[in-house]
Image (spheres, grey):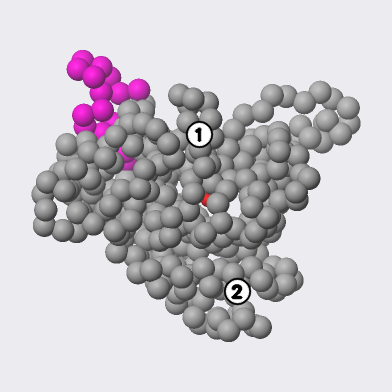
């Protein structure tokens, strides 16, 4: 297989049962293979996709002092601006050459998810100006919010198709998607230096995603690569205008008893151009308990994993990743003092 196949999702919205069965089979094959596929024929308006990239560029073009006014360091629920080189997902590489802006469902501080600190829920942080760009602060907020809701809705449709791939009722994930938490990141990857070390330079290091499904929109500049374990190669995911790259996260893999795959991917921007992308991570209802999905164990076999809430499963992955990042930092500090370094392990977002 080459890079994730591009599937036409429109039969999901149409009246042709044969075409829909074909789509379900294609999605199933991808889930079993490496958990990645791309879709066109969805219902996210292309003008909205264009508009959100205009907003994203307008924001990242701001001086760093302006962007830092909405820094995610100013809140504890992961909203707002993340500086260049803040993350390092692949131990043994350099801090990542990307900056981001986090948006989620705009929940008030009185909401139970906020009060109970569920999966970084809470109010969004908005820039007060995008001047000198023609995008107004209000337009930025409206466009990103509208886009977020369209993609969350598409994620729910994809979950309906995933239910069908497992021979379940289309509505099987209904309770799981009700009151779902999802996080969107506007991402900007500046080009890496021409002479930078291939082994060290990353836009985003090799990782797997944490939640149920991720829906990623890339602009025209490439750089995303997906791991192909059979051939031990990184495959380029060449951007297709308007297409979503969809991948399953670690929680879905666990939920399916490892039948479906959450696969490694990374970004290296060797294009010499600015790269923009927008992933939306769909986690689900934090209070929902996932226990091995039907049709995911062999006859007479027990599930590999005990039931767990979405909040504990996705939240646990976050804690683990921060723990490893902290451990790595400590290791670097030790190394600076002359102590030998440990081996490298890819970790997840
Ligand atoms: O920017 C991309 O193409 C990939 C981003 C990604 O993998 C992530 O944010 O988890
Ligand atoms: Fe990812």
For marks 2 and 1, the one nearer the N-term is: 2
- Label drawn at residue 37: none
Q: In the displayed structure, would residue 107 be above or below residue 86?
A: below
Residue 151 in sight in this render: yes
Q: Where does residue 312 sit, x and y in percent of width and height? A: 44, 41
Left or right relative to 189: residue 262: left
Task: Give the residue drawn at x 47%, y 73%.
Answer: 51
Query: In the visual, does 55 lie left or right of 268?
Result: left
Q: Is residue 6 above or below residue 189?
A: above
> Which range of residues does the magenta coloring cover?
289-304
Number of labels in the image equals 2
In the picture provided, is 321 more to the left or to the right than 157? right
Q: Which residue is mark 2?
A: 58
In front here: 85 or 243?
243
**What residue is shown at x 30% (from left), y 23% (from top)?**
303
Disc 1 element: strand
User: Residue beneath label 1, please?
Assistant: 227
Frontmost of labels 2 and 1 is: 1
Q: Main secondary structure of the magenta part?
A: loop
Give the quarter of the figure containing the N terminus.
top left
Q: Is residue 301 magenta?
A: yes
x and y percent of residue 244 in the render? Answer: 40, 54
Which quadrant of the structure image shows residue 241? bottom left
Residue at image location 65% in from the left, 65% down from the top: 71
Q: Is residue 310 visible?
A: no
Is 129 in front, or is 54?
54
């Amino acid at each position: 297989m080459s890079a994730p196949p591009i599937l036409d999702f429109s039969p999901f919205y149409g009246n042709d049962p044969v075409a829909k069965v074909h789509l379900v089979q294609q999605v199933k094959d991808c889930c079993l293979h490496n958990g990645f596929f791309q879709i066109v024929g969805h219902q996210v308006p292309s003008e909205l996709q264009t508009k959100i990239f205009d907003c994203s560029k307008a924001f990242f073009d701001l001086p760093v002092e302006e962007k830092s006014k909405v820094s995610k360091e100013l809140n504890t629920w992961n909203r707002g601006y993340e500086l260049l080189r803040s993350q390092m997902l692949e131990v043994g590489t350099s801090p990542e050459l990307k900056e981001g802006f986090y948006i989620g469902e705009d929940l008030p501080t009185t909401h139970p998810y906020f009060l109970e600190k569920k999966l970084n829920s809470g109010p969004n942080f908005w820039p007060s100006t995008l001047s000198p760009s023609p995008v107004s602060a209000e337009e930025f907020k409206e466009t990103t919010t509208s886009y977020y809701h369209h993609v969350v809705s598409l994620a729910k449709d994809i979950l309906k198709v995933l239910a069908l791939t497992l021979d379940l009722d289309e509505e099987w994930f209904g309770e799981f998607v009700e009151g779902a938490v999802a996080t969107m990141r506007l991402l900007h990857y500046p080009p890496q230096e021409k002479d930078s070390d291939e082994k060290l330079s990353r836009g985003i290091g090799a990782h797997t995603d944490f939640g149920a499904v991720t829906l990623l929109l890339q602009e025209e500049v490439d750089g995303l690569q997906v791991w192909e374990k059979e051939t031990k190669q990184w495959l380029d995911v060449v951007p297709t205008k308007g297409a979503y790259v969809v991948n399953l996260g670690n929680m879905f893999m666990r939920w399916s008893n490892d039948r479906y795959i959450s696969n490694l991917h990374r970004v290296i921007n060797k294009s010499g151009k600015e790269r923009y992308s927008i992933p939306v991570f769909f986690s689900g209802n934090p209070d929902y308990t996932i226990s091995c999905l039907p049709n995911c164990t062999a006859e007479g076999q027990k599930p590999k994993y005990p039931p767990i809430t979405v909040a504990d499963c996705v939240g646990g992955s976050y804690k683990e990743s921060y723990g490893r990042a902290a451990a790595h930092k400590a290791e670097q500090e030790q190394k600076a003092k002359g102590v030998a370094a440990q081996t490298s392990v890819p970790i997840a977002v």
